[in-house]
Amino acid sequence: MSADRTGRAEMVILTGNSYPELAENIASGLKPLGECRVFKNSDKETHVEIRESVRSKDVFIIQTGSTKDPNDNLMELMIMSYACKTSCARNIIGVLPYLPYSKQSKQKKRGCITMKLVAQMLVKAGLTHLITVDLHQKEIQGFFDIPVDNLRASSFLVDYIQEQVPDWRNAVIVARKPNQAKRVTGFAERLKLNIAVIHGSQDRESESEEADGRNSPPPLVVTGLDFPLVPVSERRSVFAIPSLVIGEQVNVKGKLPMDVVGDVNGRIAIILEDMIDDVPGLVQAADVLFDRGAYKVYALATHALFTCDAPVLIEKSRISEVVITNTVPHEFAKLQCSKIKTVDISLLLSEAIRRIHNQESMSYLFRNVEAND
């Protein structure tokens, strides 16, 4: 039968190959994982075999993004979703603790908003609901034409600070970039702590407009003429507007020196981010905090997108601990670096799945969440 005595559809939990250990932890409090095989043949194409009935059932597909191969992660999820759709599943809920391509949510030069394309592909594949954790930009929810529950891991990180950081009341919550100040403020208010903001040369230099091509058409190079060719930028208009005064634009080259706004002298500095994907910048920020008098530095984040050399950089740095959740697999990085600590959030995802399946309110999971989290 596909429904219980209360009329609710049965639950089926499936998982791809992105993070089986997390899927096992999530399902352990609900029901065993369903039988599903996701594999590649010699042609490198992804194949999916669902070995149990999903007709008229609520299917939850657990598949996170990873630094190893986010494209495979997405392709597996879409094929699994479409397989459930064509097998007449009642609801298909994607559980993506980390949503791949979430960093590409804004238009840049001649690129595109890739995250919107990914959202449309997931909906077209058959997803009817999405569960994720700490989106890089909250506006990403608007790219989907289905309900999106953006859960927050901040409560788990707050608990870690209060239980595992000695003398945490003498700490300062630090934003590594000025645009992260709002999120840091909400976090600090819950702990009744002060904040500090780092600004300066860690920001990447923007490419020049000339290199971007927006100053087109390019200067012409013509030879063999008997008269000088005036470049377009030096041509003057025949119309004079004496009353219009335009200030001269000043282009400042180079980088600002890195500095800290706020008092960290004699305190514990806790750097807070939604994801760690720039470890050299994180290490540089920690050095600046030590130079300003901080005696210990922690780094906390929801998602850890570690590159190959990231664990070695962290191990050699002056950072005491890097605390992350298990939204992205990082077991190999922990073997290389003793400073990486993990906070398990599988209970949060299990409760979200249970509430959605039982059609209960999700507001309980946001009871301690600040507006800026």
Image (cartoon, rainbow, N blue to C red):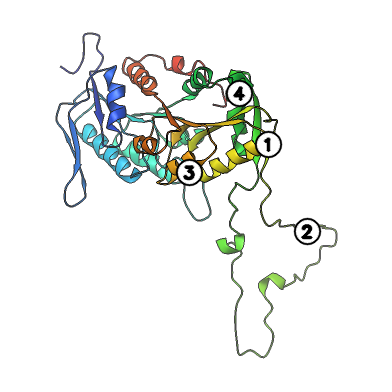
Q: Is residue 178 or residue 170 the one in the foreground?
A: 170
Element assignment for label 1: loop
Q: Residues within 10 Å of mark 4 (few under 14, many from 20)?
A: some
Look at label 1 and name its amino acid: Arg
How far apart are the alpha carbons under marks 4 and 2? Answer: 42 Å
Disc nearer the start of the sequence (2/3): 2
The residue wearing badge 1 is 292
Q: Residues within 10 Å of mark 2 (few under 14, many from 20)?
A: few
Q: Nearer the viewer, mark 4 or mark 2?
A: 4
Please tell me whether residue 107 is drawn above or below residue 91 in the rendered image.
Answer: below
Look at label 2 and name its amino acid: Glu
Q: Is residue 109 left or right of residue 37?
A: right
The residue wearing badge 4 is 188
Q: Given contact means CB atoms under 8 Å apart, are the residues at marks 4 and 1 in contact?
A: no
Q: Residue at x 20, y 29 (%)?
A: 88
Element assignment for label 4: helix
Q: Is residue 101 left or right of residue 372?
A: left
Disc nearer the start of the sequence (4/1): 4
Please tell me whether residue 342 is drawn above or below residue 307 in the rendered image.
Answer: above
